[in-house]
Amino acid sequence: MECGDGNDISFYYDNWIENRCLLDLLKLEYQENFNPGMKVCEFIQDKQWNVHKLSQHISNQDIIHKIIGIPILVTEIKESFCWRLSNTGSFTTKSATWLAHEHMKGRQPWPFKWIWRIDTMSKVKIFL
């Protein structure tokens, strides 16, 4: 991932580090310096990461190193969100289906296969 100006990315809630949000990575619930409205741009100074400010808000050095490893674009460009599971960056039902199949590996079989054997319209089966 590359970071644009950071104005549209929530520091704590958006999935911008390893496709996860910072709250999940840090397992945060509440901290004294926690400000849920912070944006990524508040940690960028002169097109570089402000390591001192990052250290004030994040105690985990591994996470800080991951953030510092995210390149900041030198042009004034807005961020855009993309679906990382397709070559084009666009969401497709095919890529979502593959993600669901990967997530289900090693689990018990889906107990509702009987739905597909019902003698009814496909849209009713899908609704069920």
Image (cartoon, rainbow, N blue to C red):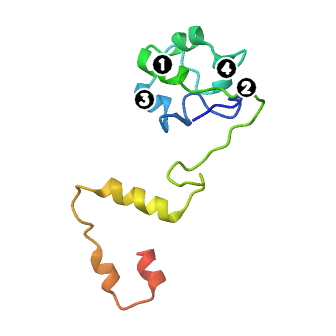
Q: Residue at x 69, y 38 (%)?
A: 79
Choose the circle earlier in sequence order: 1 or 2.
Answer: 1
Disc 1/disc 2 C-alpha distance (Å): 20 Å
Mark 1 vs mark 3: give the one in front.
Answer: 1
Choose the circle earlier in sequence order: 2 or 3.
Answer: 3
Mark 4 vs mark 2: give the one in front.
Answer: 2
Q: Which residue is mark 2?
A: 74
Residue 5, how many percent across, how many down? Answer: 71, 28
Task: Check disc 1 and report its element: helix, strand or loop.
Answer: helix
Q: Residue at x 53, y 23 (%)?
A: 69
Give the label on residue 25, or none: 3
Q: Which residue is mark 1?
A: 65
Task: Check disc 2 and report its element: helix, strand or loop.
Answer: loop
Task: Check disc 3 and report its element: helix, strand or loop.
Answer: helix
Residues at marks 1 and 3 touching, judged by CB atoms closer than 8 Å: no
Q: Is residue 30 shown above or below 117?
A: above
Choose the circle earlier in sequence order: 4 or 3.
Answer: 3
Disc 4/disc 2 C-alpha distance (Å): 16 Å
In the picture, which quadrant includes the N terminus?
top right
Mark 2 vs mark 3: give the one in front.
Answer: 2
Q: Amino acid at mark 2?
A: Val
Disc 4/disc 3 C-alpha distance (Å): 19 Å
Residue 63, how many percent across, how many down? Answer: 45, 22
Disc 2/disc 3 C-alpha distance (Å): 27 Å
Judged from this view, the residue extending furthest toward the bottom is 119
Q: Nearer the viewer, residue 106 or 110?
A: 106
Q: Amino acid at mark 1?
A: His
Give the label on residue 42, or none: 4
